Image (cartoon, rainbow, N blue to C red):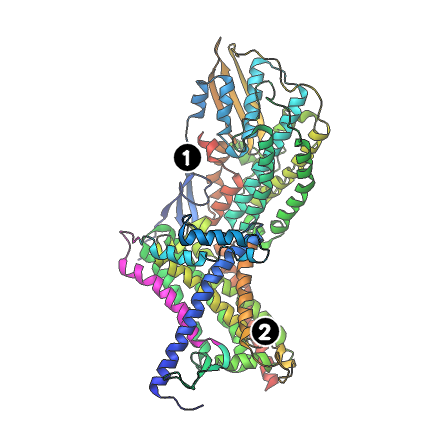
Amino acid sequence: MFKNEEMEINMGPQHPSTHGVLRLKLKLDGEVVTQCRPVIGYLHRGVEKICENKTFFQGQVWTDRMDYTSAVANNLGWAEAVEKLFGVTVPRRAQYIRTMLTEFNRLASHLIWLATHALDIGAMTVFLYTFREREAILDLFEAFCGARLTTTAFRIGGLREDLPPGFEKMVRTFLARFPDCIEEYESLLTENRIWKKRTIGIGKLSAEDAIAMGVTGPVLRAAGVAYDIRKAFPYAAYAEMDFEIPTRTEADTYARYQVRLAEMRQSTRIIQQCLDGLPEGPVMAKLPKVLRSEVNEVYHPTECPKGELGYYLVGEKGSTNPYRFHVRAPGFINLQALPMMVKGSLVADVIATIGTLDVVLGEIDR
Amino acid sequence: MQTMTLSQTCAMAILQAVAVVIFIFIVVPLTTFAERKVLGYLQDRLGATRIAGSRNGLTGALNRGMWWMGKVPMLSILRGLPMFIGDIVKLLTKEDIIPDKADRAIFIIAPALSMIASVVVFAAISFYPGALFTFPKFVPIVGGLPFSGFITDMNVGLLFILGIASVGVYGIVLGAWASNSKYPLLGGLRSAAQIVSYEVPLTLSLLVPVVLAGSLNFNEMTRMVATRMPIWAVPLLFVGFFVYFTCGFAETNRIPFDMPEAENELVAGFHTEYSGMKFGFFYLAEYINMIVVSALASAFFLGGPFLLPFGLQSFVPAATPFIGGPNVIWFLLKIFFLLFTFIWVRGTIPRYRYDQIMAIAWKYLIPFTLVDVALAAAVRFYMA
């Protein structure tokens, strides 16, 4: 008597909470999602191909534009991958400064994640509170390298400039203030009944599924797997730092929220250690004017705020460009777990799950 | 009271209706302005401080004026005030798009239905149980007549209010359906289910003052609830107020119950396809509904024009100067405080999920109010 039909709905590419130009084809039975197919590529610029036609020095500029919320972390991966390819040793002071700025970038990225995630669930005030602190971090980047978003902060072989005068004081002021700010966000969300109802048990992804899907970063750690490249394969100055890997076992959206907040606390610890133990010395290694590679290949993973960011570079004999360049973008690989996580949930949970995966389309589409 | 001729009655009714409409159209834009500013200050920013326009002319002069106001501590809060006129001008001058595949007639009627339903409710709302002032003798037609604080004094005022207010949901559902688009459809379905569910605890919670006062007449209820309550009624009214106000959030589609328009899920919900003044009507209806909910909550639970809420006024001797009797100022202050609460809540808490909202209504609010009503009946029995 009644016709029963599933409704297909396009969420995105223009939708307030698909974090850019992500498009989801959802099949809905009432409000229940029966199928979800992400469609990507709206922001494709061909970064990998472009970098093959640029010199190693020029390529770094393009890494800023992949995950634009964590440009410094992307720069670090590129710089270290190229240094690995050429066997360059970076001075210790530069390593420390790189570590410090990368951790600041982790804070900035997590702050954006918290802001948009909370806004998607309807808590709009957190958005502006986190942007207040992110502003202070961007001011630090600006003081260091002149740019705020697309920083191109590091050079191959070290840093272009040492820290500017007054930088240390800015960092100390920020560190004195920031733990209270995390408390402030937590006071709005952590024990909020609505927040808990919207996040506990939502978007579950078990450790087995996460590993099978190649998911990394806070999403994996919230499933109880303590895999962090900063500990597993230390790079920059992380081997000398004392910090913990926060994990949870619930594997839901709330657990990921707690993991990321704990990571922000750990990042402040690392920044504090970098600042206190900052060694003296040069910040740039001796490098030839032009880098010409041998036949060689290198894969360098780093722990980006979103997960494992790997750069795969192949060198060609005598060439100033990489022969082949590939990025293992954490957002791209994490996104493939989305259909699994949202199947059978409600439309509102899809939004919460996109938020918790912390997708940035610049990096997914490249 | 002297008997009025037919023409006097008509003139009086029109004057009062106009006064109420003017009141609405002053308070609604002020609420939107307050929403910008209160949210702004809650979120550590300034809110609106200037309006769009050119360097010269009126907008330029206003912007320069507001720039100067920024230097004066108290006045700086009022910057951005001209924006509420700007809002209306924008809505009126914007292109009004009707989608090709929409059902034109219903698409046009729906916003009007929402708007009319929310304005007409004011016919039965009493701001003050008596004459606000008397027209001087020289005024034609209405000279010498009192201007009362209410339009009509219906015996079943509360029923009228509830009946008309529930027509408003038709505007939302029809508008959503007529848009012939997917996101509005989801929003419309949500709102139909949500508002029908929340009508139940809303009406039940209003039964508490009805039972306690033994009347459906607006003025009578307000007076009885404020001044003739035994001490046992105070906690019951307190609970009733919270249930009513919670349902009020759902009825007005405000966060945390803004399912029908949940902007982060459904783009804009039921009014996704609306633009121009048709959207403006939905927008105004939401704010007018906020005023209605605040007015009813303050009248039936917070003592209306009397100072003390929840029947506590019963313990103040009526002869006390200033706070003993009714005063329209108290009523307006209570309305404004509740409007502020709407904004305050929006700035503080996230949004519930659709099924959780339904669970709250059916699992918690309805049983809660049923017990409350039963206890109110017991108190009433004891009073009589």
Location of residue A19 in the rendering, given as x and y in whole percent from the top left corner: 47, 40
Q: Does residue B117 appear to the left or right of A60 in the view shown?
A: left
Is circle 2 on the same chain as circle 1? no
Q: Are marks 2 and 1 in contact (CB under 8 Å)?
A: no
Can see residue A188?
A: yes
Chain assignment, label 1: A
| Badge 1: residue crowd in 10 Å (few <14, some 14–19, many ≥20) | some
Q: Residues within 10 Å of mark 2 (few under 14, many from 20)?
A: many
- Membership of A74 in magenta stretch: no
Quarter of the image where the C terminus of chain A is located? top left
**Drawn side of residue A290 relative to residue A191, left or right:** left
Q: Which circle marks residue A40 in the picture?
A: 1
| Part of the protein shown in magenta | B97-126
| Count of numbered marks | 2
Q: Which of the 4 quarters of the picture holds residue B19?
A: bottom left
Q: Amino acid at mark 2?
A: Leu
- Residue B107: say if magenta: yes
**Principal SS element in the magenta part?**
helix
Q: Which residue is mark 2?
A: B237
Gap in Å between the C-alphas at discs 2 and 1?
Answer: 55 Å
